[in-house]
Image (cartoon, helix red, strand yellow):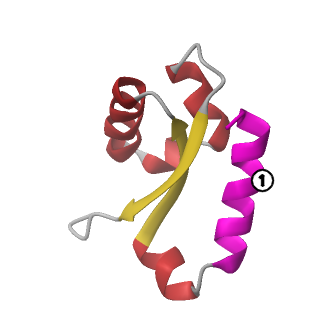
Amino acid sequence: MKYDEAVKHKKESVQNADEIVLQNYHIIITPSNTDDSTKYIEDFLKDPEAFSDESCQKYTADDDYEVVSFKKDETK
């Protein structure tokens, strides 16, 4: 999906998620391309607070994104 669509989808996902999900999972926009997404998530996990939704745009030349969620690292 285009970036603007991904932003709307993420907003809806966050609004519909319960508090437990929001506390325990990252919900992020990432490039759809697997290699770009992997690099983005690796960098994101180093310092999640340094990333915003717009950050994913620096990781791909495509305008194709997806919204993903994954469990937060419990050791941090």
Q: Residue 69: where, in percent of width, then height?
A: 45, 60
**Structural crowding at the residue carrying mark 1, measured as other residues with C-alpha within 10 Å and reported as few (<14), some (14–19) or many (≥20):** few
Q: Which residues are magenta?
A: 1-16
Q: Quadrant of residue 53?
A: top right
Residue 19: percent from left, percent from top: 56, 86
- Asked where in the image residue 42 lies, by quadrant, the reply is top left
Residue at the (59%, 36%) spot, across then down: 65
Left or right: where 16 falls relative to 50: right
Residue at point 48%, 79% (across, down) = 21
Residue found at the very far left of the displayed protein: 75
Indicate yes or no whether the magenta region holds residue 11. Answer: yes
Q: Is residue 68 above or below residue 44?
A: below
Provide the residue designation for mark 1: 8
Give the residue displayed 56% in from the left and 32% down from the top: 56
* SS assignment at label 1: helix
Q: Position of residue 59 (x, y in %)?
A: 50, 22
The chief SS type of the magenta part is helix
* Nearer to us in this view, 39 or 50: 39
20, 5: nearer the viewer: 5
Query: The C terminus is located in which quarter?
Result: bottom left
**Residue 9 at x, y percent in the picture:** 71, 56
